[in-house]
Amino acid sequence: MNTMEAIRSRRSVRTFDGNPLQPEQVRAVLEYAESVRNPYEIPIAWRILDAKKHGLSSPVITGTDTYIAGKMHRVPHVEEAFGYSFEKIVLFAESQGLGTTWIAGTMKRDAFENAMELTGDEVMPCVSPLGTPAARMSLREVMMRKGIRADTRMDFGELFFDGSFTAPLTPEKAGRLADAFEAVRLAPSAVNKQPWRIVLCGDTAHFYEKRSKGYVAADGWDLQKVDLGIALCHFELAARDSGSALSFEIRDPALPLPDATSYLASWTLT
Ligand SMILES: Cc1cc2nc3c(=O)[nH]c(=O)nc-3n(C[C@H](O)[C@H](O)[C@H](O)COP(=O)(O)O)c2cc1C
């Protein structure tokens, strides 16, 4: 798979063509999903779900009955680990010509969780439909994209910094990591909030979460950390695509921080 191509061409697909997927297409996605590892080494169990069989629905999705979902134990870093792994699956699906949409909210959650047979402390952060994109988006999808300005992204220098949060980074200064930063900039996020910030210090990219109001649940669940997992995934895939090797570490460099911003993890060129 050419990662940068998949990252550039992917968009959320909410209108599918109504044709069921071939069993081998579904099998390929599930086999790929089961092969994915995340830097936190948190195991995730994946299932393909049938909307008719399990009574599943999402008010924003039309034209497919196939979904993929994952469940895992609720341990530290579970949100980032899920974001990282699920985005790899989304990009694989994209490379196979299949459409996806990350869905955390707009679904009949109880029905999906029952279908996943959650037990004890297990969580199912998000699901995605799988199918062939329809030739045209439904009016509802067009309006929804407009409402959340889904086709726009923040500028490079608003998201990425050079040595400290006071100095914006440019693609030129990012050097051989320029594509990796661009891949993060283009990533999908809940309500397109783009909560990722990165400070490049030498060969190390430190990832931070810039929290928007209202995304941390009363029990501490932080949906925007899922977005950060997506950012970690895009950065690594694009860097490796352009020939760089990276190592993962959680070691806070204790930089002065803007409001509502916290350190998450780092990738270092090796
Ligand atoms: C963690 C996460 C949760 C999301 N939840 C939903 C959702 O519940 N319903 C929905 O229609 N889209 C959802 N999205 C899709 C975003 O709205 C979408 O990625 C963003 O607007 C950017 O558009 P794009 O994916 O087409 O580039 C979610 C995305 C992410 C990453």
Image (tube, helix red, strand yellow):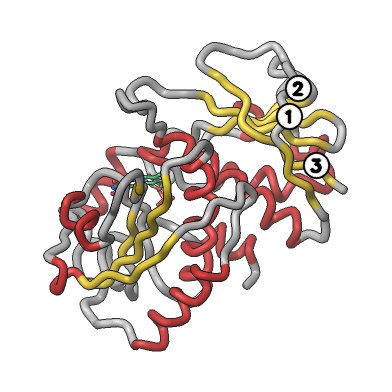
Residue located beneath label 1 in the image: 251
Q: Amino acid under label 2?
A: Pro
Identify the disc placed on residue 154.
none
Q: Residue at x 52, y 56 (%)?
A: 43
Residue count near mark 2 (Cα–Cα under 10 Å), binned few <14, some 14–19, many ≥20? few
For the residue pair 261 and 81, the one nearer the viewer reads as 81
Front position among marks 3 and 1: 1
Residue located beneath label 2 in the image: 253
Work out whether mark 2 precedes mark 3 in sequence or the reverse, and give the earlier one. Answer: 2
Residue 198 against residue 59 in the figure, above or below: above
Residue 117 appears at what percent x and percent y? 26, 59
For the residue pair 45 and 7, the one nearer the viewer reads as 45
Disc 2 to disc 1, C-alpha distance: 6 Å
Identify the disc placed on residue 268.
3
Q: Amino acid under label 3?
A: Thr
Front position among marks 2 and 1: 1
Q: Residue at x 69, y 11 (%)?
A: 256
Residue count near mark 1 (Cα–Cα under 10 Å), binned few <14, some 14–19, many ≥20? few
Residue 226 against residue 215 in the figure, above or below: below
Residue 164 appears at what percent x and percent y? 75, 19
The kind of secondary structure element at disc 1 is loop
Is residue 159 visible from the viewing direction of this image?
no
Is residue 141 visible from the viewing direction of this image?
yes
Ligand 1 within 8 angstroms of badge 1 C-beta: no
Disc 2 to disc 3, C-alpha distance: 13 Å
Ligand 1 within 8 angstroms of badge 2 C-beta: no
